[in-house]
Amino acid sequence: RQRDAAREAARLARQTPPGPPTSLSDLPAGDLLFPGTNMLCPKPTITDPAEQPCMAGLRFGKACRNQGCPYSHKSINELSAPSQAEWKAHVLSHPQLFFNSKSVTCFPAEPGLYAEPAQVHASKGGKRKRSRIK
């Protein structure tokens, strides 16, 4: 019976038309943009223990699924000046890591610091030209 039920579910799944495609610009994006296929984003060393980042929240723009997450879910804009400086140095030291130009506003425009979410979602990985406009 279980085998028959599994076959029927698979048959129905093949017959169900796919939903409308999701626009790349509709994908979630947080304060950090990290294109490519690697799921693990480089994590910085932030000196203030209260501002240790939750990488899931910063990368995908939503709180992590861990109910008791011990890490900070603050936006980079809301961090202290020393923590912001540590973040800036971290992003500039990783060529595939960028701040989201739509959400991070605490730094002046600088080459290699910002990217647009649509640029990152359209990227298949590898190097691309960094946005100089903020």
Image (spheres, helix red, strand yellow):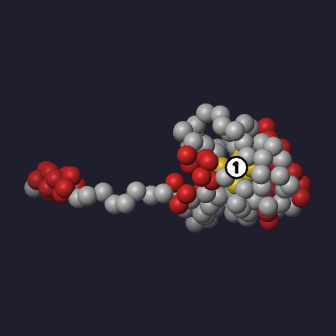
Q: Residues within 10 Å of mark 1 (few under 14, many from 20)?
A: many
Residue 11 placement, left or right of 26: left
| Residue positioned 71% across, 62% down in the render | 103
The amino acid type, in three-letter code, at marker 1 is Ala
* Residue 33, horizontal then vertical, whole percent: 66, 49
Q: Nearer the viewer, residue 132 or 40?
A: 132
Horizontal side of residue 79 vs 117, given as left or right: right
Residue at 70% over, 49% down: 115
Q: Residue at x 74, y 49 (%)?
A: 114
Quick one: which residue is furthest to the front in this view? 133
Residue 117 visible in this rendered orientation of the protein: yes
Q: Quadrant of the N terminus?
A: bottom left
- On screen, residue 97 versus residue 89, left or right, reads left
Q: Whole-percent x and y of residue 62?
A: 60, 63
Which residue is disc 1 drawn over?
Answer: 115
Residue that appears at 60% across and 43% down: 35
User: Where does the C terminus fall, quadrant-wise?
Assistant: bottom right
Q: Residue furthest right?
A: 82
Residue 64 in which image quadrant: bottom right
Q: Position of residue 73 (x, y in %)?
A: 69, 63
> Does 19 sit above or below residue 3?
below
Give the percent coordinates (x, y) of residue 119: 62, 48
Q: Which of the 4 quarters of the picture holds residue 60?
A: bottom right
- Count of labels shown? 1
92 or 128: nearer the viewer = 128
SS at circle 1:
strand
Residue 28 left/right relative to 45: left
Q: Is residue 72 visible in this depiction of the protein?
A: no
